[in-house]
């Protein structure tokens, strides 16, 4: 059995090209996850704003009804 000839390209830091690829992939995935989390957070904020808006509209309507009854 003959040994395989493999060459390992190393950069000045001593990391192999494969390690750099894995680091770049991990960095890209983390960036994507952060983007997804940000989008979810924006969605939650929008939903909360809509709930509060509906609540304010109901309160305004109740105030108008109470004023109409008082007249």
Image: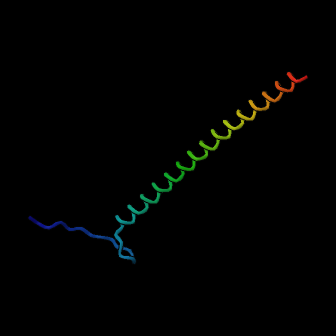
Q: In the image, is 12 to the left or to the right of 52?
A: left
Residue placed at 71% from the left, 33% from the top?
A: 54
Residue that extends furthest to the right in the rendered view of this protein: 71
Q: In the image, is 42 to the left or to the right of 32?
A: right
Residue placed at 85% from the left, 21% from the top?
A: 69
Number of marks: 0
Residue 68 locus on image (x, y percent)? 87, 23
| Residue 3, placed above or below residue 57 | below
Q: Nearer the viewer, residue 39 or 15?
A: 39
Q: Nearer the viewer, residue 54 or 29?
A: 54
Residue that extends furthest to the front in the rendered view of this protein: 70
Residue placed at 50% from the left, 56% from the top?
A: 31
| Residue 33, placed above or below residue 56 | below
Q: Nearer the viewer, residue 62 or 50?
A: 62
Residue that extends furthest to the bottom in the rendered view of this protein: 12
Q: In the image, is 30 to the left or to the right of 46?
A: left
Quadrant of the rendering where the C terminus is positioned: top right
| Residue 30, placed above or below residue 14 | above
């Amino acid at each position: 059995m003959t040994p395989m000839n493999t060459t390992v390209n190393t950069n000045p830091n001593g990391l192999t090209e494969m390690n750099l690829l894995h680091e770049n992939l991990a960095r890209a995935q983390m960036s994507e996850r952060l983007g997804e989390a940000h989008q979810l957070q924006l969605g939650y904020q929008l939903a909360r704003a809509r709930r509060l808006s509906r609540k304010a509209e109901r309160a305004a309507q109740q105030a108008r009804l109470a004023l109409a009854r008082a007249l």
